[in-house]
Image (cartoon, rainbow, N blue to C red):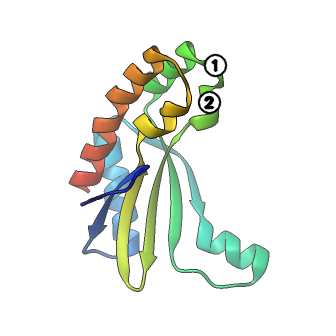
Amino acid sequence: MNNAQYGYRKEVTYTFNEAIEKITKSLNENGFGIISNIDIAQKIKEKTGEDFENYVILGACNPKLALSALKVETEVGLLLPCNVIVYEKSGQVTVSAILPSVAMGFVDNPALEAVASEVEPKLKTAINNC
């Protein structure tokens, strides 16, 4: 497990596709659904013709907590959903999630900080259990 300044990540021992399946399941078990799935490698190939290693951005959303955040700050939608990435670099697969405390730290609102502090452990648990 590794902590970046803005993300929480885990290197895994399974394949890229298995990692996507496992994190999707783990997120679901922690109250999140996937509302977007962006295959960055595919988009880069389409738009530039260049190859890029496997890289997917999953937009994870816990509807109840997203609603709480939106009721506090309408513009917080700019920071939603919680991005979870799965990527492969030199054969090593990594799963990583944004830290809501950092993302929501841009907004000076204690009520929003409370929502972020509820979301963050759920994301970390999902990463830890995938």
Question: Are discs 1 and 2 less than 8 Å apart at CB?
Answer: yes
Q: Quadrant of residue 2?
A: bottom left
- For this rendering, which residue is in front, 24 or 70? 70
Q: Residue at x 69, y 74 (%)?
A: 44
Task: Check the picture and name the quadrant holding the N terminus.
Answer: bottom left
Q: Secondary structure at mark 2?
A: helix
As measured in the structure, the alpha-carbon distance from the residue carrying label 1 to the one carrying label 2 is: 7 Å
Between residue 8 and residue 31, name the one nearer to us: 8
- Residue 41 placed where, x, y %? 60, 74
* Crowd class of label 2 (few under 14; some 14 to 19; many from 20; radius 10 Å): few
Q: Which mark is residue 74?
A: 1
The count of marks equals: 2
**In the image, 105: left or right of 3?**
right
* Residue in the picture at 39% in, 57% down: 96
In the rendering, at what x and y percent does residue 65 appear? 43, 24
- Percent across and percent down for residue 78 are 64, 34
- The picture quadrant where one finds residue 73 is top right
Q: Residue at x 35, y 66 (%)?
A: 19
The residue that mark 2 highlights is 77
Image side of residue 77 versus residue 29, left or right: right
Helix, strand or loop under label 1: helix
Q: Name the amino acid type tagged 1.
A: Thr
Q: Position of residue 43 (x, y in %)?
A: 68, 69
Q: Amino acid at mark 2?
A: Gly
Q: Is residue 8 above or below residue 47?
A: above
- Pick the quarter of the image with the C terminus: bottom left
Taking 71 as reference, is 46 above or below it? below
